[in-house]
Image: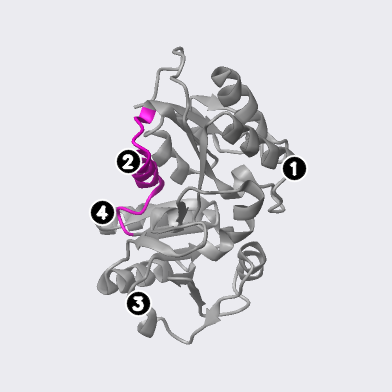
Amino acid sequence: MQAGRGEKPETIQLLIADVDGTLVTQDKVLTPRAIAAVAHLKDAGIKFAITSGRPPLGMEMLIKPLNITTPISAFNGGLFVKPDLSIIDQKVLPADVAGQVVKTLTDHHLDVWIYRGNDWFALSAHGPHVDKESWTVKFKPKIVSTFDDVLDNVVKIVGVSDDLKAVARAETDAQGQFGDHVSATRSQPYYLDVTHPGANKGGVALRLAKEFNLPASRIATIGDMPNDVLMFAHSGLSIAMGNADAPVKRAARRVTKSNEEEGFAIAVEKYILASAG
């Protein structure tokens, strides 16, 4: 549980950070100030971990600059890897559920992407956000004519559309249709991520708490999207980015500046390092 808004949190020993919209700028840049903030955390004896809807390869460019030594949570907790990207474990969707999810997203007129291991599958190389995602994660999807042959061992399915209301409706319907059989949350307003029910950022926080034998009160979390709220609930100090929507901000104990205004570094300096000193 989180400390009340008027209470001083216990000394933080681990910070878990979302990546897109949080750790990096809108242009996916890791700023020198963000790099320095993470270095200062480590100097203070505070561990640092990242979690994202990205595949492992999509976070590789962060590992060396941030000197990450903790387990890395890809696909919102669907896949945990070591800093060398070797797999620790993964949570996959049953093939029959994966097929039903694809149908539901398609019925809402969303483009569909499937992630399996380190592979990304799509039906078109020119669909919405494919070029942007390719640039972000630094690799391109494998184009298939049908998903029928790639529904086993699926770690994440993404529904994509610039019709943001359609994405929101698909999220509501997926949650209602599949219940506890999946986790369905938006990682961006135009991305609906569907994963194993145990693969969510709340599970990431619980997993890392167990890994490092820490109570929730010693953990800080920072993010900008509704799926980050799931990890806010398992941390003593939760921080929403200034670019987050109002419900995300309301769910957090603190709010920092946006990711275009060095909000991540400011949060580390103001809310974590200052209290640690």
Of the residues shown, which amino acid type is indicated by label 1? Pro
Distance from the alpha carbon under mark 4 to that under mark 2:
26 Å
Badge 3: residue crowd in 10 Å (few <14, some 14–19, many ≥20): many
Residue 225 position in % (x across, y down): 51, 44
Instruction: Name the residue tied to disc 2.
Output: 210
Instruction: Name the residue tied to disc 1.
Output: 32
Q: Are marks 3 and 2 in contact (CB under 8 Å)?
A: no
Identify the residue at image location x=50%, y=52%: 52
Residue 189 position in % (x across, y down): 54, 51
Who comes first in sequence, dot 2 or dot 1?
1
Front of the two marks 1 and 4: 1
Instruction: Name the residue tied to disc 4.
Output: 179
Distance from the alpha carbon under mark 3 to that under mark 1:
41 Å
Quarter of the figure with residue 153:
bottom left
Name the side, left or right, on which 67 lies relative to 55: right
Of the residues shown, which amino acid type is indicated by label 2? Lys
Identify the residue at image location x=53%, y=31%: 45
Identify the residue at image location x=34%, y=67%: 101
Badge 4: residue crowd in 10 Å (few <14, some 14–19, many ≥20): few
Who comes first in sequence, dot 3 or dot 2?
3
Front of the two marks 3 and 1: 1
Instruction: Name the residue tied to disc 3.
Output: 151
User: SS of the residue at dot 3?
Assistant: loop
